[in-house]
Image (spheres, coloured by chain):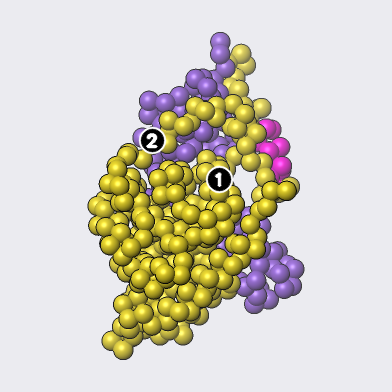
Chain colours: A purple, B yellow
Amino acid sequence: MHELSIVCNIVELVAEVAAGRMVRRVTVEIGKLSGVEPEAIAFCFPEVARGTPVEDATLDIREVDAEARCEICGADFPTPDMLSACPCGSRQFQRLRGEELNIKSIELEEAM
Amino acid sequence: MTNMQTGASAPIAAMDEHGHFHAHGEAAHGDHGHSHSHDEHHTHDHDRHHHDHDHDGRPHGQSNHHVEIEKRILAKNDAAAAKCRAWFAGREIVALNLVSSPGAGKTTLLERSIADLAMELSLFVIEGDQATSNDGARIRAAGAPVVQLNTGTGCHLDAEMIVQALAELRPTAGSVVFIENVGNLVCPALFDLGERAKAVIYSTAEGEDKPLKYPHMFRAAGIVILNKIDLLPHLDFSMERARENIRLVNPDAEIVEVSARTGAGTQVLYEWIRAQLASAKQSAPILA
């Protein structure tokens, strides 16, 4: 289950940025064709975060719909799965989005 | 990690121990690279808007501090992979990341390749398995220097493991480094190891629809090696349909048909490897 490694990477990166402050919220972006299951990410997160400055944070997962640009007809079209082809029939295309695996932002507790 | 030549064993260094080295700069400025298109700025604006006005019902003085990060989750792996890739390029080394289901014949294919090519090419192997050094021992017996990595419960190799394995293996300039990943068609797809290409080994016993069931891995492949063609007379396996299915998810992948057991078709694979070496030589960076 590679989602566990993904979550370890999220917690590690966020903890570095937080530099000791408590994290309230972590916003990540997961493309629908990234090969990562958001549910599995949400499942692992509390366990991995336990005992770190991230343990009380809410994990906000934003899924990104996949889109591609056809290299034959130039149209942009949705690619809901890995087998999607352009409506013109072409399979030659550039993926525009849908493979994201990014940490967008975090919210830190302000020092009082 | 075990160096199968010297027998020296060392734990694979825990990855989080490196974390503190890159506390500030990297985390903030990392790789705001090419992949961030204009549409992400919309998300930004939206983000800020959303968070500025949403204090989770707390009074103003206790509002949270919002920090934009915009970093790939796998940034650390990607950085280690980039390091490996540059190291390979400078030494005109071709690294191939071999991935497959368990039992598709990765190790047997390596044994065959070592036997056939050892007089002509310098071959090195990094063996990845959850447990045991059985495969490492097979490769060593076949005659190639090998470092065995055991991932424990881990389901894939990552680039930091490759950095450590290379320090131990010390492949020579102009060589081929085969990285035999953990047998798994899901997880290794996401982890760049700095390889020149991923080679998916796909055996005829697995059925024609494997590329459709594991599209991420087949999509990431530079070459698909259809193995166990010696079994074709005993199977209801249509090579034509298998090729069509590979094409559906990856129109650009090279496809070769081999039998690691009999050696049939392997010359085509070796030609492809030689072509990769020639190309690595051509494109090696030269410091003026």
Quarter of the view holding residue B118: bottom left
Residue beneath the point at 36% across and 56% down:
B145
Q: Residue furthest front?
A: B119
Dot 2: element:
loop
The amino acid marked with disc number 2 is Ala
Spot occupied by residue B198 in the image (x, y as percentages of width and height): 49, 62
Dot 1 amino acid type: Lys
Relative depth, front residue between B59 and B213? B213
On the image, which quarter does residue B185 sit in? bottom left
Place residue B46 in its image quadrant.
top right
Numbered tag placed on residue B14 in the rendering: 2
Q: Nearer the viewer, residue B82 or A71?
A: B82
Q: Residue at x 62, y 37 (%)?
A: B30
For this view, does B239 lie left or right of residue A32?
left
Please report the bounds of the magenta region as a residue range: B39-50
Q: Is residue B8 above or below residue B201?
A: above
Which comes sooner in the sequence, label 2 or label 1?
A: 2
Q: Is residue B242 left or right of residue B260?
A: right
User: How far apart in space, not on screen, are marks 2 and 1 (Cα)?
Assistant: 18 Å
Residue at the extreme top of the image, as rendered: A112
Which chain is mark 2 on?
A: B
Residue under disc 2 on the same chain as residue under disc 1? yes
Question: Residue visible at 30% across and 51% down?
Answer: B4
Q: Position of residue B177 (x, y in %)?
A: 45, 58
| Front residue of this view, candidates B257 and A66 | B257
Q: Which residue is mark 1?
A: B83
Whether the magenta-drawn stretch holds residue B124 is answered as no
B45 in the magenta segment: yes
The quarter in which the N terminus of chain B is drawn is: top left
Relative to A111, does residue A97 appear above or below in the rendering? below
